[in-house]
Image (spheres, rainbow, N blue to C red):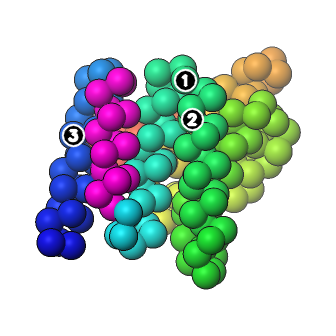
């Protein structure tokens, strides 16, 4: 029975991902929320990946308050787990980035992206995350009219995407 619930959680997560790719955000959110129900007793990283996906789909839909709520739930789960932030450092970074992004703390976001997140995801060869966060950093520089640095990080984002896809 437990394996059935985990499998249903994975299926719901994957359906949420597909709906999100099709920009059917309401349906994506529903599938991710269903996934979290099924994953209630699943390992922490299985819940965190779905929470992160929920944050991202809310951001894509421009539902920033709901995205912030999902970020805080991710933080809560990390804090409640023994060694949560250290054993799940990747998710610590993800939720930290979205917390700063959603609260508009550009200077702290810049420091986190530049000094920790982008190098970390590059080193782990998680080029999709490194590329996304390089783009976020470029956007941050654009808002501050620092066009040379923005161009540098947009180019890095493109390079990382090419590395990921092998193009």
| Mark-to-mark CA distance, 2 and 1 | 6 Å
Cα distance between the residues tagged 1 and 3:
20 Å
**CB-based contact (under 8 Å), mark 2 and mark 1:** yes
Q: Nearer the viewer, residue 83 or 153?
A: 83
Residue 78 visible to the viewer: yes
- Write down the residue under mark 1: 63
Q: Which mark is residue 15?
A: 3
Q: Provide the residue designation for mark 2.
A: 67
For label 3, the SS is helix
Q: Are marks 3 and 2 in contact (CB under 8 Å)?
A: no
* Image quarter in which the N terminus is found: bottom left
What x and y, as percent, mark residue 76? Answer: 63, 60
Regarding residue 158, the answer to whether it shows in the image is: no
Disc on the earlier residue, 3 or 2: 3
Magenta segment includes 28: yes
Circle 3 crowding by C-alpha within 10 Å: few under 14, some 14–19, many from 20 = some
Query: Which residue shows up at 34% across the image and 53% down it?
Result: 37
- Report x, y in % for residue 118: 61, 52
Of label 1 and label 3, which has the lower sequence position?
3
Q: Position of residue 2 (x, y in %)?
A: 21, 73
Q: Residue at x 63, y 57 (%)?
A: 75
Where are the magenta residues, as a range?
Answer: 25-39
């Amino acid at each position: 029975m437990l394996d059935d619930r985990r499998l249903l959680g994975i299926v719901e997560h994957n359906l949420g991902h597909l709906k999100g790719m099709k920009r059917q955000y309401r349906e994506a959110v529903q599938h991710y929320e269903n996934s979290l129900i099924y994953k209630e007793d699943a390992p922490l990283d299985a819940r965190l990946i779905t929470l992160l996906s929920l944050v991202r789909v809310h951001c894509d839909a421009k539902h920033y308050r709901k995205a912030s709520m999902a970020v805080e739930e991710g933080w809560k789960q990390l804090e409640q787990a023994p060694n949560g932030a250290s054993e799940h450092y990747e998710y610590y970074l993800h939720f930290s980035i979205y917390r700063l992004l959603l609260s508009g703390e550009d200077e702290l976001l810049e420091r986190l992206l530049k000094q920790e997140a982008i190098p970390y995801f590059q080193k782990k060869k998680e080029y999709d995350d490194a590329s996304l966060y390089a783009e976020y950093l470029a956007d941050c520089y654009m808002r501050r009219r620092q066009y040379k640095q923005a161009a540098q990080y947009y180019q890095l984002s493109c390079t990382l995407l090419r590395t990921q896809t092998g193009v």
